[in-house]
Image (cartoon, rainbow, N blue to C red):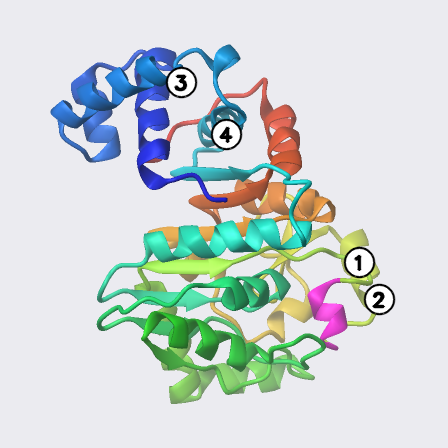
Amino acid sequence: MAIRQTDQTIHKAAWLYYTHGLRQDEVARQLNISRASVAMYLRKARETGIVNISTSTRMFTDDAIAREIEDLYGLASVWVVPHDGRALDPTAEVPIVGASVFLDLVRNGDRIGVAWGRTVYAMADAMSYADLNDVTVVQMCGNLGAPYSYRPDQCTMEIARRLNAKGLNFYAPLVLTSERLARDLRAEPVIREQLASVAHCNLALFSVGTLDEDSHVVMCGALTAGEIHAMRDAGAAGVIAGQMIDASGALLDCDYNRRVISADLASIRSIGKRLMVVQEESKFVPLVAALSGGLCTHLVVSASLARRLRDERSGGTTDRAI
């Protein structure tokens, strides 16, 4: 179950005030709320024991880890999903929370970029319906085969349907057979305009892919298992919107990336809110790469991955980006 937005704001206010030593007016500016609200939230934090992490509930223990990850990786907001052993389908927990967080981030008039993948498919299935106005959902990368329950274009349209939004699909393949073909296709007015429009999105939704036989780009036919292993040997660390990134989160200089039809990483980074949802332990290395490259501002992650992220950088410091 997702932590309520009010509860998270209470915890963030207490974290900034007691852990970072900010004044109440500084906390108010950081969270874009009134100083009176800060005072009220701090009072609630004391009354409920949030300021005493050792005696707080499990939910707030996990939320304390979320605040640490925000500090360590310079993220705007992190949601940590504890494992629920009573859940009928434990693998659905993170996508369900991710869908709830995503809906909370959407505003009327937003333009939303979506990169398809298994996690995004699961979120589309779990997403509640919202009656929003003037929202557009844009597919950020080309299409491939559909080994799962949705084709990439169906995934985009299903999210648009849940939001009462307009959907814009990408009617081009993800990977071309040659660099020349890819260059020529990107130059076509319709494709060029859609790629350029991604930078004007207010919100992006995506996950990060692995570099193994179970990778989405392998399952969809973009690469063979042998080819993706070779990419890993050449320095690839993960997949974002169908593109290979290295350990620093930069686009890998390789033939494959030059044949891909997808929004470039600079356009993705220019989007104000970039929500990444990750559950699988196998995605730890790609996730760290994506965070190192500044590709994410908002993160929904399992508790086990959250602990690994904290331990990975617990000795470091980073500027806060709220």
Estimate the spatial distance between the alpha carbons at disc 3 and disc 4, rounded to whole Å.
Answer: 10 Å
Residue shown at 39%/81% (left/top)? 168
Task: From the top left corner, tell me how far across and down residue 166 is, in percent.
Answer: 33, 79
- Range of magenta residues: 215-221
- Amino acid type of the residue tagged 4 in the rendering: Met
Return the disc, 2 or 4, that comes first in the chain's sequence: 4
Closest to the observer: 208 or 132?
A: 132
Return the disc, 1 or 4, that comes first in the chain's sequence: 4
Q: Contact, CB < 8 Å: mark 2 with mark 4?
A: no
Report whether 221 appears left or right of 197.
right
Q: Is the residue 272 above or below the residue 163 in the image?
A: above
Is residue 249 at all visible to an observer of this figure?
A: yes
How packed is label 1: few (under 14 Cα within 10 Å), some, or many (20 or more)?
some
Estimate the spatial distance between the alpha carbons at disc 2 and disc 4, rounded to whole Å.
Answer: 40 Å
Residue on which the image places disc 2: 225
Residue on which the image places disc 4: 59
Residue on which the image places disc 1: 212
